[in-house]
Amino acid sequence: DLFSVLFMILITLDSVQSKFLSNMASLAEDDAITTITKDSESELLEAVKTLNSKGGTIYINTPVINVSTTSTIKLTGSTAGGIVGMKLSDGTYPRIDFTKARDAGSTARGFTISGSNQFIKYLIIENAGDNGIWISGAKNLIDHVIARYNNDSGIQLSNEAEGNTVNHSYSYRNCDVNTFGANADGFAPKLGATNTEFNYCYSWDNSDDGWDSYDKEGDNSATVTYNHCAC
């Protein structure tokens, strides 16, 4: 009956979740660069240096890291690695907030990824002086990310970016104030980006386009693929 079916589904999901958490714990032990548990910009920047040289994962387990540096945080490595936010006790995920940098006059992007095999997962990227995330590298992954309140497109892929994937991400209320909102898109795979794939991504309330695929070639293009996305 229906109750039995639902019960079996719950048991299966519980088993899958247990295996996932076990694998995450093992992963954290095996490849962790550090786990940041307080609002420490300096700790994040130091960990990124290690990430760029050796790979590995930076885990963030604090509600917010406030960034005041007016320079972009750059992921430049080729060895697999990235930054992962950990679910907080209230059910939310960590924020990387660039308000202090922007107040200091920064027009820098929040994160740039020029490397390959890098990932940013389970984070909120907000208030950057330009793009929240800008990707020019290859085979990188953005997963379960929110890009909001940035001073240009939330997530942009350009300059020969190739084979990158964006999953389950949201981009909203990004606005380039100094240019009267003419440029800030939600997602912008354009100007040289190829073979970009979006899965279950949503964009709304951005000052320019929700999706800007300027050099996309028709409805079925190798340049960009949208699966279950909306604006």
Image: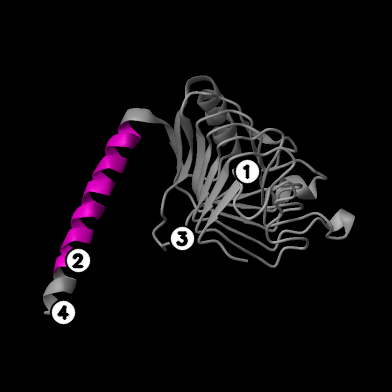
Q: Is residue 228 left or right of residue 16?
A: right
Q: Please give the range of residues in magenta.
A: 8-29
Circle 1: residue type:
Thr
Frontmost of labels 3 and 1 is: 1
Circle 2: residue type:
Ile
**Which x, y percent locates residue 24?**
31, 42
Quote the CA–CA distance across marks 3 and 1. Answer: 34 Å
Frontmost of labels 3 and 2 is: 2
Q: Is residue 116 left or right of residue 218?
A: left
Disc 4, disc 3: CB below 8 Å? no
Quote the CA–CA distance across marks 1 and 4. Answer: 44 Å
Name the residue tied to disc 2: 9
Name the residue tied to disc 1: 223
Q: Which SS does the magenta portion mostly show?
A: helix
Quote the CA–CA distance across marks 1 and 2. Answer: 38 Å
Question: Residue drawn at (18%, 55%), measured in percent from left and top?
Answer: 15
Disc 4, disc 2: CB below 8 Å? no
Frontmost of labels 1 and 4 is: 1
Name the residue tied to disc 4: 2
Residue 92 shows which numbered tag? Answer: 3
Q: Earlier in the sequence, mark 1 or mark 4?
A: 4
**Which x, y percent locates residue 131?**
71, 47
Disc 1, disc 2: CB below 8 Å? no
**Which x, y percent locates residue 103?**
78, 50
**Which x, y percent locates residue 160?**
68, 32
Quote the CA–CA distance across marks 4 and 3. Answer: 33 Å
